[in-house]
Image (tube, rainbow, N blue to C red):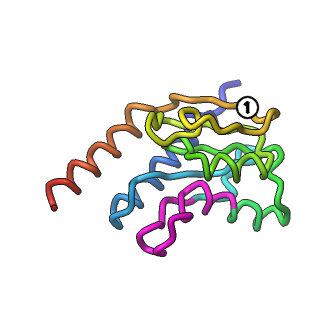
Amino acid sequence: MITPFDDTYFMKKALQEAEAAFEIGEVPVGAVIVVGNRIIAKAHNLTERLNDVTAHAEMQAITAAANYLGGKYLHHCTLYVTLEPCQMCAGALYWSQISKIVYAAKDTDRGFVTMGTKIHPKTELVSGVLEEEASAILKRFFIQKRNLN
């Protein structure tokens, strides 16, 4: 039986969060955390709104998911995020022991892969899911930002 709940389905939900960030002038990165085909946390960047450099989409989602689950570990959870996590977020994901990370676009400048940051050895990693769509919203955001300045 084919289920509609696959990596593409949940990445589309993360892209909706990225659009929400775009609409409020935040770098358009969105994230959702899923357990058992149910979204338990959704978030987008809030660094400008909260005046907080740690308010990345992943960090917001990790906190929301931990609160929902009532514990700090995200076992059996999957993070879907539109941009490869930075080393700060990868570190938090390491400590959360999240089971799976799925990201769309690579961040060749500041992503955890480029920075050599390790993720938890039991964490499954998938990249490139809806990469073109995620890259397009980021490009649109930075083009608009440059044109406004």
Q: Secondary structure at mark 1?
A: strand
- Residue shown at 50%/36% (left/top)? 104
Q: Dot 1 corresponds to which residue? A: 124
User: Above or below — where is 106 with respect to 57?
Assistant: above
- Residue 65 percent across, percent down from the top left: 72, 60
| 47 within the magenta span | yes
Q: Is residue 105 visible?
A: no
Q: Could you say which quadrant of the image residue 57 lies in?
A: bottom right
- Residue shown at 60%/51% (left/top)? 32
- Residue 71 percent across, percent down from the top left: 85, 63
Q: Which residues are magenta?
A: 43-62
From the viewer's side, name the closer residue of 110 and 93.
Answer: 110
Quarter that holds the N terminus: top right
- Residue 144 percent across, percent down from the top left: 20, 53
Horizontally, residue 107 falls left or right of residue 60, namely left
Quarter that holds the C terminus: bottom left
| 90 within the magenta span | no
Horizontally, residue 138 falls left or right of residue 68, namely left
From the viewer's side, name the closer residue of 142 and 100.
Answer: 142
> Residue extending furthest bottom?
50
- Residue shown at 56%/37% (left/top)? 115
From the viewer's side, name the closer residue of 107 and 25.
Answer: 107
- Residue 51 percent across, percent down from the top left: 46, 74
Q: Is residue 123 visible?
A: yes
Horizontally, residue 88 falls left or right of residue 12, namely right
Q: How many marks?
A: 1
Neighbours of disc 1 within 10 Å: few (<14), some (14-19), many (20+): few
> Residue extending furthest top?
1
Q: Amino acid at mark 1?
A: Glu
